[in-house]
Amino acid sequence: MAMPTSRLANAARLISSPHSPRLSSVSTSAARPCVATVSPRRIAVPHLSPRSFCPTTSPPPISISTSSTPPHPPPLFTANAADHEKDNELLRSLFDAPPSSSSSSSSRNSLKSSGPSTGLFEIPSLTSPQSFLTLAQKTLARAQLLVDRIDRAGSVDATTTQGRNELHEVVRNLDRLSDLLCGVIDMAELVRNAHPNPDWAEAANAAYEYLCGYMNVLNTHTGLYRVLKNILATPDIVSNLSTEAVAVAQVFLRDFEKSGIHLPPSERERFVQLSDEILVLGRGFLQDIAGNDASDDFARSVGSDGVNEDGNPQDSVQIPSDWLYDMSPQLVRALKSSCLYERDGVLHFSALDHPWAFQTILKYAPDARARKAAFRAANYGSRAQVQRLERLLKARAELATLTGAASYSEMALGDKMAKEPRNVEEFLRALTHHHRPRAAKDLDKLRNLKLQDSLSGQSTSPSSPSSSSSSSSARARSSVFNPRPSLPKFEPWDREMYTDHHFRAPSLRSVQPLSPYFSLGSVFAGLSRLFSSLYGIRFRASTLAPGEVWSDGPGDVMKVEVLDAREGAKGGSDGAAEGLIGTIYADLWGRDGKPGGAAHYTVRCSRRVDKDDEAGDFEFGRAEDGSRVRPEHLGTQAQGFGNPLQAPTFQQRDRAGSYQLPVVVLMCDFSRPGNALGASGGTGPCLLAWHEVETLFHEMGHAVHSMIGRTSYHNVSGTRCATDFVELPSILMEHFVASPSVVSLFARHHATGATLPYEHLASHLGAVKSLEGLDTYHQILLARLDQVYHSSEAARDSFDSTRAYQDLDSAMSSLLSTSPETTALSYTPGSAPQVRFGHLFGYGSTYYSYLLDRAIASKVWQSLFADNPLDPHNGHLFKNKCLKFGGGKDPWHLLADLLGTDEIRNGDSRAMMEVGKWGIE
């Protein structure tokens, strides 16, 4: 089957958060690109590391202050402020208290009801693994009616009222079809990854693949494509559609055509073949990076790399033990025990099997020869790996040519903010110019450290033949005739070690541990306080029904209601003004078999449902065999018109219509409370490192986007927007989390309740960002490489991915210094770092997206929130002019209105250049 690109199949996009990682080789540490037939509505970030634990107590009420800002009381938005703060404290205690402790048992038990299973996600029919495939079969039968109805709309008499009405319903019916299928597929994607019971996981996977197979059929359904294309070509119909409906229709049409549906039969067959080949090549490419055996037909056809002159395999790395002189004896022993073997004083490693060893040498070996060998090994690419990548790029180029595009990048960017490759290049060029001085300054910091080492004779081991001449040269440069010696040549294999030296400087060391101030429960409660101030929404712990969640161990999954003070359901709970607008399930603890890292899954999107003409499906649609179907044939009366996923709905007070309640799952792998001993020997809450606090804020940016998105169509709801726009809300949250007034909402010592002196956090942030200019510059290099690889150059017979990397690395390096002593950032002859760049498959031609959204988030922060991060006026401005539209409006128009600048409204090369000039602050 071809990899589907239709919106019916593209349930969402997987967006990474590559936070400018510090790398000596190409980054592969962010989220896995989706290689399955349907992309789940999941937005993932890099793997998180668990941190320490301490005893838990019940701290006093929050009273946070900082040295740089006045105290900020928790911002609550109704007369029931005390009740709301009780809800926040309940959230804190639930996420902080160990599941086995007596202090948590009563509160947790009160939020977990007993009785017979209500079904997974409270779907009555989903109570056993066997019921998953049954649910998928019923969903497909219901979907077939919609497909037939839409197809038949292409032959209705448009001169009749009934015919015109049916044509006007096509866009909504396509969206309903997408929502129906994605409702099961996205839920199955979560369950097959997260459920600890293998029977459930296998059943979910079977349902997932069953419906994905049907999705592939829909991608080639020419009837659906023709009726949609005809509607968009009929002014009388288009003029009666809303702007949002037209946007949805255009997205469907573009994605149909990305699947090659408009091509002649022979070309369409070739399109399917190429799509299959790209999928297989991409999977092999990712398996290579993961260190798994990707010995497929492609690898066998290329053959092995052979042996070196000394008879060793090409991936063999030899490092003499005397090159490891001056390393820690413990590290040297560990290296010797992990190598393949040691012979005649030489350690033999495999470049494919010993990444830990090479990273250790790069970071801690004073001898540059050892680091150079390790760098080359860490960036080793076999002939098969390089050729697999180049075949992948050429297949994409040919695929684009079939669709009439000049390059794969041109084909992929048509529905993105960037629109076309030259606009991306304008953005990256402007961003390069903006960040070059900062990157050069950071590089000089590291070169100065190398100079200090060379002056002290510590840059190579005493046994190194070059040691004497190197030190002599350094002393000559620093003689009385030259008191200001020039900075030394800086090599790619120098970066890891001197970066480590940089961060070991006393001025960059944390004075006080930060984690004790960041218990998971306090951070979660602080997020509720922040959102109540900004958007008028807050969190409240909710009761779990039996069988509602996929892992029912004590505290495994928490259910959190999202309440809105202004736009919630009419007649809110307990007669309060606020009302429910969605649900977040928090699956935050690591467990066996659960994927690592953090991810945001959208299980159900919000959409307007009161205009659904479900009765018309049975009037106009037919089963696959042409027979008429009645609702009772597909389900019980309680399931309405045979829809197996009758989702809860709500009515807003200030807006007409009923809306489907969105559901998202926030998944992390934090260490469970009580798994470690605290400072005084007891057990305690999960204490987060600062980068984990940032991750939680980032993920909540996605979750709240899903909650606030209020569109009539599922296909543009919340995070279902352009790839290069979707990270904006989450990256903006990373600005909030670092501001003193927001930190005051959650940072208190878990045991004593003491406030965190903000200067300690500020010191830590200053250290973390002290080389950010160079990190960002490297990310720009990777984004530009991605564009080169997906340009028309990839189709040439002479295309050489390694040469392209080398040329770009050299060009970017030369911009950082006028001195010839700086020759490369991340490439050395004999290496192939591009085979470690996993994003090339998952985000081909769109790696720039994260940089773009970082620049936009910086501008939004400075324009709206820098002076007062808790300003409800600007919070609601961002909510109502940006978040609520999801993908239903042109993001350039949203930003132009939000920021009050028409300079970017057209979203052309000028707009992209302007955003590049904003830079990333």
Image: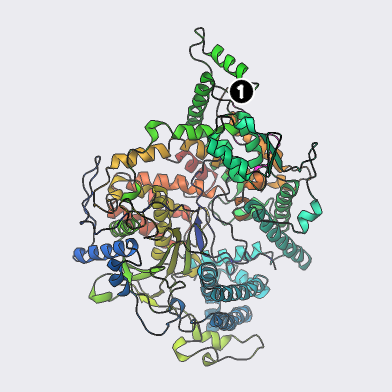
Which three-letter amino acid code belongs to the residue tagged 1?
Pro
Label 1 residue SS: loop
| Residue holding disc 1 | 820
- Report the residue at 65% width, 21% height from top: 465
Bin the neighbour count of mark 1 within 10 Å (Cα to Cα): few under 14, some 14-19, many 20 and up.
few
Quarter-of-image position of residue 395: bottom right
- Place of residue 532 in the rendered image (x, y in percent of width and height, measured from the top left): 29, 60
Q: Examine the residues drawn in magenta and state their main secondary structure.
A: loop
Q: Is residue 579 magenta?
A: no
Whether residue 654 is visible here, answered yes or no, is: no
Residues 17 and 513: in front is 513
Any part of residue 317 in sight: yes
As drawn, 655 above or below 508: below
Give the image quarter of residue 286.
Answer: bottom right
Image height of 760 relative to 148, above or below: above
Depth check: give the residue in front, 252 or 37. Answer: 37
Q: Which part of the image, by quadrant, shows the N terminus?
A: bottom right
Horizontal and vertical percent position of residue 34: 59, 60
Specify start and end residues of the magenta stretch as a single range. Answer: 822-833
- Against 423, residue 712 (above or below) is below
